[in-house]
Image (tube, helix red, strand yellow):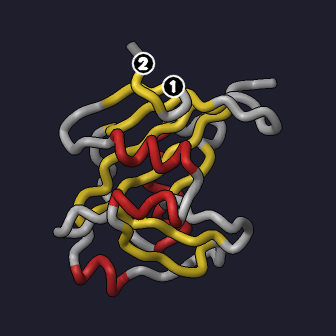
Amino acid sequence: MALLVAAGALFRDAGGRFMLVKPHYKPEWDIPGGMVEEGETPSEACAREVAEELGLTIAVGPALVIDWAPHPAQGDKLLFVFDGGLLTEADRSAIRFVDGEITEWAFVAPDNLDDYTVARLSRRLRAAVPGETRYLEHGVPCG
């Protein structure tokens, strides 16, 4: 089975909360993003997915987290979390669920992530520090 690669954007508000989105096809919340397509870089995939899911055109910031994540059913994944920056009020009012994949969004405090998403994503997001790139293995710092 080939290694899968996915990329997403971590947006924040002025209070340090993270933007999560609710896909219609699963119970857990996620960050905007998705799978990298053939011939596409992770940062290009991130920008494309944000445009498709939220209707926002963004300049993708630096990688905050690179996480190797094993999955028994789907195979191993390499997951990139890019800095989406702060979402302004204008950005928030421009959000449109373009492709119908996302049904809602919310800002969530880091301490409340476990109430919304799976533990491995919570670990990944809590490891993200603006201005730094961190390498994780299954959501845990390596080394």
How many residues crowd around disc 2 within 10 Å: few (fewer than 14), some, or many (20 or more)?
few
x, y (%) of residue 138? 55, 31
Q: How far across and how far down the image is residue 82, in percent?
A: 37, 45
Q: Quadrant of residue 74?
A: top right
Left-right relation of 66 to 129: right
Quadrant where the N terminus is found in the figure: top right
> Which type of secondary structure does the marked residue at label 1 adopt?
strand
Q: From what the image shows, is residue 101 above or below residue 43? A: below
Asked whether 79 or 129 is in front, the reply is: 129
Please tell me the numbered disc located at residue 55: none
State the residue position of label 1: 137
Corner quadrant of residue 47: bottom left
Identify whether 56 is placed above or below 84.
below
| Marks 1 and 2 close (CB-CB < 8 Å) | yes
For the C terminus, which image quadrant?
top left
Q: Tell me which residue sits at (49%, 34%) in the image.
A: 139
Residue drawn at x 57%, y 42% is 6
Q: Which residue is mark 2?
A: 142
Q: Residue at x 31, y 49 (%)?
A: 83
